[in-house]
Image (spheres, rainbow, N blue to C red):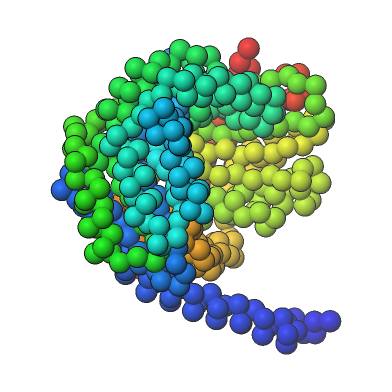
Amino acid sequence: MVKGGTMPTRQRKDKILKRIIYLILLLLITAQAITIQRDTLKNGLVVLSVEAHKIPMVEMRILIRAGSVYDPAQQEGLAYILNQLLLRRSERSKEAPLDMIEYVGGELSPLIGEDYAGFSARILSKDLSLLIKVVGDILTNPVFDTLEFNRLKKETISRLKANMDDPYYLGMVNFRKYLFAGSPLNHLPEGFDSTIKGITLDAVKNFFKKYYIPNNTFFVFVGDFSRDSLLKILGNEFEKWPKGGRPNLNIESPRPPAGKNGYIIKRDISQAYIFLGFLGPNLSAPDWLQIRLMNYILGGSGLISRITNEIREKRGLAYSAYSYFERFHNGGYFVCEVQTKNESANEVVQIIINELKRMQIEISEDELTSAKKYYTGHLPLEFDTYRKMANFIAEIEKAKLGLDYLERFEGLISHITLAEVKEAAIKYLHPEDFCLVIVGDLKEDDLKFEDINWIR
C-alpha cells in the first residue's frame, strides 16, 4: 500500500531503471544517427546507408516516387499492378525474383503507397551482391509477361471484390472516396476492381518508363556491410540505368463539400464501423510535431487518450477508439475510427465531435508533458531492429527532415509550448466541417443531426 503519496520502493526502482535504459538507448541511437550517410550516384540515384555490424544481415528499401497518386483517372490501381508484376515469374527467367532471394533464406516483397512504390528486402550479408543483382535486373531489365499480367489482374479483381465484404475496408474505401473527391488521393493504392479491368499491359510499360528512373528513386541500406564496397557494387550494377526527366505532379487541393457530410452504408451486422475525419496537413507541414503531440492527447495514445477514455473507459461503448493523421506529399487527412454497437453509434459520434471541440479549448500542461515523455522515450524503440531503422530512415528522406533529425528530435519536442499545441488543434481539427462514413445496420434517422448533409 502507498503511504503519503509515495511510490513503493520496487516500483520506483523499476521506473528509474527503465528511464536509465531509455536514456542509454537514446544516446546509442543519437550516436548512430551521425553514421547515416547520403550518397548520390552519377545518374541521380540516392543511397542512404547505415553500417551496423551486430548481426550478419542487411535490410534494404527501394523507394520510387511512383505510387498510386500517379494513377491516371479511370486507371486507379495501375501503380499497384506494375509494382506487383515486377516480382512475378517470367518466361525469360523461369523464376520469380522473390523466389531467387527466398532460395538463399532472404526476403523480397513489393511496397506500394500513395507517394512511393518499391521493394522491401532482407538478406544475409554474404548474399547482398545477389540481392543487388536481382533488384538491378528488375529495375533496368524488366519483363512484362502477358500471362502473369492477366493472371495478376484476375487475382487482384477477385481480392478487391472479396475485400468489400469486410466492413472496415468498405468504410475506409468510401471515406477516402468522398473526402478526396476529384483528387488522385481518392483511392487506396490497390485501386478498384472496376478500374483494374481496364488497365492494359501497354499502360503498365509506359508507367514504368515514365517513373521508374534512377533520379526518381532512393535506396536505404542498414546492416552489416562496408559503405565503400556497397557503393562500388551499386555503381557497377546501376551505371547503365539511364537518367530521365523527372515528372512533376501538380495536384489541386481537393475541396469536399463544406459543413457536415455523412454517408451510411447499410449492412446487416451488429457493429457500426465509424469513420469521421477531414482533410489534414501534407508531408512538409512545418508544425508536424505540434500536431503529433496534439493528436497523442486527443486519440493517438491508446487507453490514456481523451477519445478512448471517454468512449471505452467511461462508457464502455467500444473496445478500440482512436484517431490519427495520414500525410502524403500532396495532401493528407485526419480520421477517428470506432467500432461500436449500432444503437451506440449516435452517442459515439457526438462524443467524438465534443472531444474535437474541447481539444481546441482545453489542454493541460500535464497532458502535454505526458505526450512529450512518450515521444522522447519511445524513440529508441524505433531502432531496436534493422528493419525498423531502415523504415525510419526512409521516412526521414521522404519528409526531407535532414540526416541530423535524430540528434535534433528531443530538443525539437522539448521546446514545443502549450500555445503551439492549442494552435495546431484550432488549425487542423474541424468539428463543424467533416466527412462521416458509417457501415452498419443504421438509418439516417438513427443519428440525431439537424445540420448534416446525407449523401445518397
Q: Nearer the viewer, residue 223 or 98?
A: 98
- Within the image, what quadrant is residue 207 found in? top left
Q: Name the image quarter holding the C terminus.
A: top right
Residue situated furthest left in the rendering: 42
Q: Nearer the viewer, residue 349 or 47?
A: 47
Q: Is residue 290 above or below residue 243?
A: below
Which residue is located at x 49 percent, y 74 percent?
Answer: 25
State the residue at coordinates (53%, 14%).
194
Tell me if residue 377 comes above or below residue 134 in the rendering. below
Q: In the drawing, does residue 343 fall left or right of residue 231?
A: right
- The answer to whether residue 5 is visible is yes
Q: Nearer the viewer, residue 365 or 55?
A: 55
Location of the N terminus by quadrant is: bottom right
Q: How many marks?
A: 0
Residue 276 locus on image (x, y percent): 61, 33
Q: Quadrant of residue 251?
A: top left
Left or right of residue 306: residue 144: left
Residue 411 x, y percent position in the rendering: 39, 68
Task: Confirm whether residue 69 shows in the render.
Answer: no
Q: Which residue shows up at 66% across the image and 24% down it? A: 162
Residue depicted at 61% across the width and 25% down the height: 159
Task: Decide: is 414 above or below 92.
Answer: below
- The location of residue 342, given as percent across then percent down, is 80, 29
Q: How far across and down, in percent of the image, does residue 405 sit? A: 35, 62
